Image (cartoon, rainbow, N blue to C red):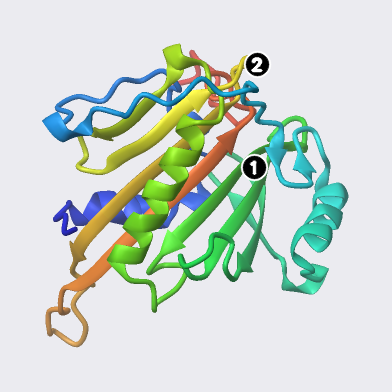
Amino acid sequence: MRMCFRAGMIAALVLLPAIAWAQIAPAAKPADAPPSAAAPQPATPAEQAHVDGFRSAKWGMIDAQVKAAIRADFNIADDKIKHTENLAEKTQVLTIAVPDLLEGAGMAQVSYIFGYTSKKLIQVNALWGTAADPQATPDKIVAAADQLRLLFLDSGYDPATVTANAKMADGSILVFQGQDSDKHTTLLRLAAGATTPPAKDGKPGKPVEVTALSLSYILDAREPDIYRVKKGLF
């Protein structure tokens, strides 16, 4: 499967672990979906989806609790956890590298985002692809996207909020989007194609194949706990 998308869009997906996905409206319906984008109708699941975080890390946990969850889930020590700040949203981020988070997809980068005001967990992002693993191949990343889409379609998300396999205006594929009964959002997007690195020593960079699959679990996509400039100041 080969998709040629704009380099700017790919770069945005690659940078996602440092950017809160909560800016995206959960009910947004993408335009220009291709005819093949019709989502298969899942069987009625036995249980409804309940998005309360990611594995042992739950909404509302503070930094120390999430670190304990990371140790329990992935046996990763505190000194292997990267601390960063989203300067625009003024949120704190813990990021780890996890091998085989999804079998066959290669190394993943998992980021835990803490709210600007609450200082508690509000979002978890997972990123697969060449940014997280230079050895990642497009076919494996696309296969991972298909596996996760089928899983989510059969997980009991509110049918009125579900969108699958839809082409977005920026050229990426909205593989899955849905909410549970508490309006917690799951979002899965795929981008693949070629991007050209900046010129070096006056020589243009050679095009590089880039693939990115991003998965986000979001506590509140409509009213995220991020810094906002007050209206009326500018």
Type of amino acid at the residue the image marks with label 2: Asp
Residue 42 seen in the figure: yes
Type of amino acid at the residue the image marks with label 1: Thr
Q: CA distance from mark 2 to mark 1?
A: 23 Å
Looking at the image, which residue is at 43% across and 39% down? Answer: 150
Residue 197 is situated, as x and y percent measured from the top left of the image, at 23, 72
Give the structural element (helix, strand or loop) at label 2: loop
- Mark 1 crowd level (few <14, some 14–19, many ≥20, 10 Å Cα): many
Which of 19 and 43 lies nearest the eye of the viewer? 43
Looking at the image, which residue is at 86% across and 48% down? Answer: 65
- Mark 2 crowd level (few <14, some 14–19, many ≥20, 10 Å Cα): few
From what the image shows, is residue 39 above or below residue 14?
above
Q: Is residue 132 left or right of residue 139?
A: right
> Label 2, on which residue?
182
The image quadrant that residue 1 belongs to is bottom left
Looking at the image, which residue is at 43% across and 49% down? Answer: 147
- Specify the quadrant that holds the C terminus: top left
Q: Is residue 169 left or right of residue 117?
A: left
Q: Is residue 62 left or right of residue 234?
A: right
Residue 34 seen in the figure: no
Residue 185 is situated, as x and y percent measured from the top left of the image, at 54, 27
Q: How many labels, in total?
A: 2
Q: Is residue 68 left or right of residue 156?
A: right
From what the image shows, is residue 88 above or below residue 159?
below
Give the structural element (helix, strand or loop) at label 1: strand
The image quadrant that residue 168 belongs to is top left
Which of 162 and 222 lies nearest the eye of the viewer? 162
> Label 1, on which residue?
91
